[in-house]
Amino acid sequence: MDTFLQQFINGLSLGAIYALIALGYTMVYGVLRLINFAHGDVYMLGAFAGYYIATALNMDANPSVLGAIVVTIGAMGVCAVIGILIERLAYRPVRHHSRLTSLITAIGVSLLLEYGGQVVFGATPRFFPQMIRSETYTLGPVQITNQNLLIIVVSLVVMFGLEYIVHQTKIGKAMRATSFNLSVARLMGINTDFIIAFTFALGSALAAAGGVMVALAIPRIDPLMGLMTGLKAFVAAVLGGIGNIPGAMLGGMLIGLMETWIAATSYSTYRDAVAFAVLILILLFRPAGILGTSVAEKV
């Protein structure tokens, strides 16, 4: 039982990482019906933005919670701008083309960021400054580090914050209207270009927060770090119900728990295969996801 509880805590902290990134996937898909495969690479850019800001502030020598907050907000701002640029330069020109065109564009942007990152940052992994000194808390038989606890707390705060924005604010109402029918929303006076750009900015900022949080717990970053993590976060979004904010959180947590439990068995070499096996099963038996709803489309 003690081992089970420890694995459960470890799985939650890993799942919270996937959930943070999955929230960005689900927001963009919810508004634009676009799978932004470059989202995992924005997570990588967030980690590097945090790395350079933390290095400039000499956070290794002067660790502090306030400094970590400044670094995280700075990385989120950088990636929000990058998200707006990606939407404006890559996705907006093909918005009215077929979905296949948008999908191919998304894959192209992802490859550009991955291998462009290797050119700009170099292929050699960097080690992220320790902005917060690691501490381990013991609660009975369970141990959890302050970094993992922070990841879980940030993920929950982000989820409730997004739920509030989407359902309780004017811009959230505009996002839901744009999601329901882009053309009608435009005719009703909604600036749909601004709403879509805002969605990309917010989703990219969340990915950056995820990048910094992960770099705190696992201080090793490289230009391809978003590839596998981004794919697993996409599976998490599909599992929970893509377009559904609580679904993205639930899917991320479930993928994290399954990976952790598999890693603790003799089948640990199949850890990375779990997410893709889940994707196949969910598409076969419940394509809308656990919390998603099927919507009939007229063709």
Image (cartoon, rainbow, N blue to C red):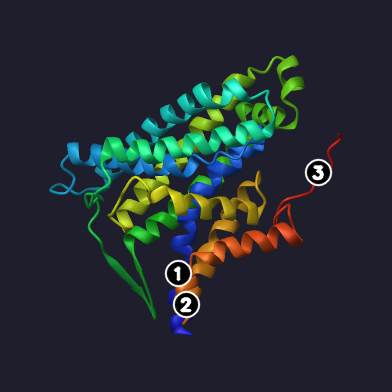
Q: Is residue 249 visible?
A: yes
Kindly identify which residue carries mark 1.
9
Do tag 1 and tag 2 residues touch (Cβ < 8 Å)? yes
Measured as percent of width and height from the top left, residue 210 is found at 42, 47
Q: CA distance from mark 3 to mark 1?
A: 35 Å
Depth order, front residue of 276/178? 276
* Label 2 Cα crowd, 10 Å radius (few <14 / some 14-19 / many 20+): few
Q: SS for tag 1?
A: helix
Residue at 60% across / 40% down in the picture? 35
Residue type at mark 2 is Leu
Residue at 61% across / 65% down in the picture? 277
Q: Where is residue 136, by image quadrant?
A: bottom left
Q: Residue reaching furthest bottom?
A: 1
Q: CA distance from mark 1 to mark 2?
A: 6 Å
Measured as percent of width and height from the top left, residue 288 is found at 73, 52
* Label 3 Cα crowd, 10 Å radius (few <14 / some 14-19 / many 20+): few
Image disc number at residue 295: 3
Query: Left of 245 or right of it: where is 232?
Result: left
Image disc number at residue 5: 2
